[in-house]
Every structure is written in structure tokens, then in C-alpha cells.
Image (cartoon, rainbow, N blue to C red):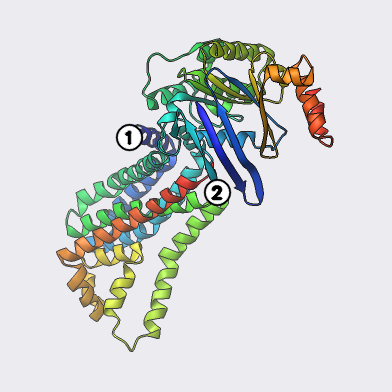
Amino acid sequence: MIKIQGIRKRFRKMQVLSDINADLKKGQVIALIGPNGSGKTTLIKCILGLVKPDHGTIFCNDTDITESVDYREDVGYMPQIGRYPDHMKVGQLFNLVKDIRQRKKNVDEELFYKFKLDTIANKPMRTLSGGTRQKVSAALAFLFDADILILDEPTAGLDPLSSDILKSKIISEKEKGKLILITSHVLSDLEDLATDVMYLHEGKHLFTKSIGELHAQTGEEKLSKSIARIMRDQQKTETIYLKIAK
Amino acid sequence: MLKISRYVLYDIIRNKVMIAYTLFLLITSMCLFQLEENSSKAILSLMNIVLLVVPLVSLVFSTIHWYNSYEFIELMLTQPISRRKVLLSEYMGISSSFLTAILIGLGVPILIYEFNAVGLSLLLVGCLLSMVFTSISFLAAVKSRDKAKGIGVALLLWFYFSLLFDGLLLLLLFAFSDYPLEKFTLVVSSLNPIDLGRIFIMLKMDVSALMGYTGAIYKEFLGSNLGLIYTLVIMIVWAIVPVWLSLRSFKKKDL
């Protein structure tokens, strides 16, 4: 569904992405993993067209994404840090997005109600806490039943209960055969979600492997442990990330 | 596109600044018309206020509004909406709210006290200047990521157009006073929309008789119907080109 070909991006002197190639297919749940600053968010922003790559092309459903913006009809995006107009009320925000997508009906409001956003529909966005904002972002991403879901650190900042609601929602969407791209540093969260792991390191795409392959390669049962092992093998010096994986 | 413009417009109307601006224009023009015996004197004072205030408010307010609606713009761009649509509807939303402010704040008093060619040309110049300077502010805002820098650039541009430009022009005229510069000044004043607006209004008034030989040249050209069309075209070019340039750089921008 999404094909990434030779994406390169540099911000001033820093090469953020160098020659990324990937082919993401329907039904996959891809865990995009890498240390801080490895280019995960930039890659996601490239797919969304928020960041323009210096080289390379991205195809979504076989059309170049620079040709038209219609492909974003099929994309639900949950940003890492949701930034919304301050004075806008929660209810207004949802109405605005529905209005702009011209979709009044057949929207998926499951998360909207499960996160009890209907009870705070009259609160302005600026009064919301970080976690509640995160809930709003999640509910917006799932609102249009999009075939491609891009979730940037979905569970960061959510309380365990909400995190569980979101995870079970992701699983139920996965069963519908959607393409889901998740980045997260909480590897245990990805454990029961991911089918494949895409590993970025300093802007380079080191590998994409299915969970089965990873387990076979490392002989570890848990995703967090196998990732940790791979990192240990690859980068003896990279100690920071290991702490997180443990 | 209109849908997004409507949200922008709604957002601006809730913002009290636009209402204050409308009231300021309304009260100032009402007062001037009431106080001055001679209505053309009132128009002259009003013109000076309009030529100073309208560009300033358009530049600064639009620049700040752009930065404040950055989140809104980001949200729009994750939806299936092109960057072109987002930028143009922002522009339409802001400039239409300025036009409304001018039409109420200036239009109503002019309609009551001075409904003639001079009054209407002042109204027209007010509207055109709002569009021109909103457009210029977009260029300043899109080009600079930093808010303080963007607003600083907008203010500098205002200084340039309202103060510096006239000084430079005067310097030029002094330096080359031995040469016939009438046609030259005509062309150069097209480089500053405020000057063009001022000349355009002045020529509709009696005071234009006091402007000497250059005034006569101006009157002959800008006072005619051709001059009206010329002014309109130049002003519209001034309104379109900066927005177009900002659109070009906005399309390449990383958010």
C-alpha cells in the first residue's frame, strides 16, 4: 500500500534520512523502532507530506503522493504531540474535521465515546491535559475508518486504562486487514500488536523483519528482548537504548 | 476552500481586535467629519490616518494571526487538503475580514457625509491597501519560521513603505533635479502601494492644483479613467504577487 523509494532528507547539516526503501503492505502492523533522533517521525511526516524529501518518491496505493492530496483520505494520523487551535472546543474540533472531510455519517466514533470525550465536548483545547489531548488525537485518527493508520507514539502519556482501550482498538483494526504503522519506545506495548519490525538507526533503514524471523534469529521469545539482542550485536556502544529495552 | 475560510473568519470575528479596529475607524472618521467644517479637509486628515493605520494593522495582525493559526494549518495539512487551498483560504478569510472592517468603519461615515468621488476613492484605496498588505504579511510570515522575526520583518516592511520609501524618493529627486523626472516619479510611485493610493486620492481633491508641474502630469495620467484602471491593476498586482510567492515557498516548506 505504501512504497518508499530512496527517500533522503537533510535538515541543514544533519542527514536525517538516508536512502530509505520500504514496501508496506495491507494487513501488516509495522513497528517502527529506533533510538531518539533516528528519523522515525521525519519518515512519518514524509509519508503524510508534511515534510518534503530531498530525493526519492513515496507511493501510496501506486500513486505518487506529490501528485494529489487525495491519498490522505485513506490515512488516519495520530501525531506524537497533538497541537490544536487553542480556543477551539473539543466538539468543534471534531465537527470541523468531519466538515472538512465532508463526512457527517458513517464515522467511527468508538474511541470518542470510550475515552468519554463527549463529556468534555465543551472544553476548549487549551485547557486539556497532555493525556487528554492524546486521546483527542487518537479519536481523530480512527474517526474516518481509514485503511492506513499512522500512529506516532500512541500510548505515550496515556493512563493504563486508556492505553488498554487504544490497544484493543488497534487490534480490532488490525483484524480488519488495515496497514498500521506504529512508532513506540515502549516495546512491551508493541508485543501483541506488531507483525513486522522496521528498524531505523541514524536515518538508515537497517532492516525490516517479521516477528517470526526475529524470534528465529535471536532465539528470544519477547520482542523487547530480541530487539535488545540485535542492538547489542549491532551497536556495542549504543547503551542508552538498551536501558529502555530492559 | 470556502469552508476553511469560514472557520478562519469565525476565528477572527471572535478575536476582539478586529472589532476594536472597526470601531476605531468608525469613531475616527465620524469625529473628523463632525469636527471639520470643510469636508475635504476632513477627508484629507482621514486619508493620512488610513494610509498609516490600514497598512500597519493589516501587516501586523495578519502576521500574528498566521503564527497563531499554525496548529490549525498543521491539522488541515494532515487532512486531504492541499497546501494551496489552506494558504489561499487563510488569505481569503483574513482579507475578507479586513474588507468588512473597512466597509463598516470607513464606508458608513463616507456614505453619510461624503458620498462622492473623493470619498469613494478613499474607500477603494483602503480596501486595496488591506489586501496588498495582508498579502505582503503572508510573505513575511511564511518565509520566517520564527515568530519574532516574522513580526519584525512585517514592521520593517511597514517602515519602509510608509516612511523610508518617501525619503529615498525625495533624495533621488534632489540628486537628479536637473533632469525631467515627471514620468520617472510616476513609475517609481507604482513601486509603493501607499504612495500610489495617496496620489490617487489627492488627484480627486482640489489640493492637486497646488502640486505644480509634476502634479499636472499626474493629473493628466492618473486623474483619467486610464489612470483609475492603471491604479487598480498595479494594486491588484501588489496583492497577488506576494501571496503567490508565499504560496511557492509554502509548498516546499517542511512543517
Q: Which mark is residue B2?
A: 1
Q: How many marks?
A: 2
Please determine whether, in this image, residue B145 is positioned above or below residue B229: above
The answer to whether residue A196 is left or right of residue B3 is right
Residue A28's x, y, as percent? Answer: 57, 19
Q: Which residue is mark 2?
A: B145
**Residue located at (42% from left, 79% from top):** B171
Identify the subunit bearing mark 1: B
Identify the secondary structure beneath mark 1. helix
Secondary structure of residue under mark 2: loop
Q: Residues within 10 Å of mark 1 (few under 14, many from 20)?
A: few
Please state the horizontal and vertical placement of residue B95, each as a whole percent of the image.
35, 45
Residue B121 sits in quarter: bottom left
Q: What's the residue at 30%, 77% (across, down)? A: B184
Q: Is residue B139 above or below residue A48?
A: below
Query: x and y percent of residue B207 in the render?
Result: 23, 71
